[in-house]
Amino acid sequence: MHSVEQRIASLAVHRHSLVTYGGMIEAGITRREIERRQECGLIVPRFRGVFAMAGAEPTYEERVLAACLATGGVASHRCAARLFGLRGFGREERVEISVPSRRATKLDGVVAHTSNLLELKEDPDGLADRLWRCCTSIKAAA
């Protein structure tokens, strides 16, 4: 069996060093083990339920993904334009997300829009991962 640190790292490897509380629990990491890693500074909270690996340099992409993971929302507006690599948005610093209309959200440094077109019935972690792969593959193809 892998150590707790190895399991956390394997969750974070393709997510800009981010892990979710729910993801760690699903991976068999106990609440106490999570608390200990947070107390020791091995994982650092970004938003409620979303942590970064210690030493991970915060990036724009990490902030966007952390906001999406924390809310079950999706990158939108100017933020999505930057992630898709659209001309004129390369220096955009705002993190903008859209969340389902029934989810009010307030995150520091994040502009949240609501939409009744976003009815997310599936696991928000899975949706964020799929959207992230979509954004990065489109950007790489451009």
Image: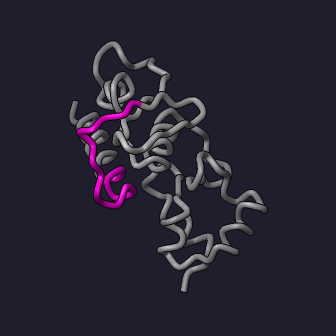
Q: Quadrant of the C terminus?
A: top left
Viewer-closest of 66 and 11 = 66
In the image, is residue 66 above or below residue 28?
A: above
In the image, is residue 81 above or below residue 28?
A: above
The magenta-colored residue range is 113-129
- Where residue 69 appears, x then y in whole percent? 45, 50
In the image, is residue 24 above or below residue 58?
A: below
In the displayed structure image, the side of residue 98 where residue 10 appears, left or right: right
- Where residue 66 appears, x then y in whole percent? 50, 45
Does 124 lie within the magenta span? Answer: yes
Is any part of residue 10 visible from this angle?
Answer: no
Residue at (53, 69) in percent of width and height: 24
Asked which quadrant contains residue 117, the reply is top left
In the displayed structure image, the side of residue 16 where residue 34 appears, left or right: right
Q: Which color scheme does this rendered protein use?
A: one colour
Residue at (36, 35) in percent of width and height: 98
Residue at (37, 17) in percent of width and height: 89
Asked which quadrant contains residue 78, the reply is top left
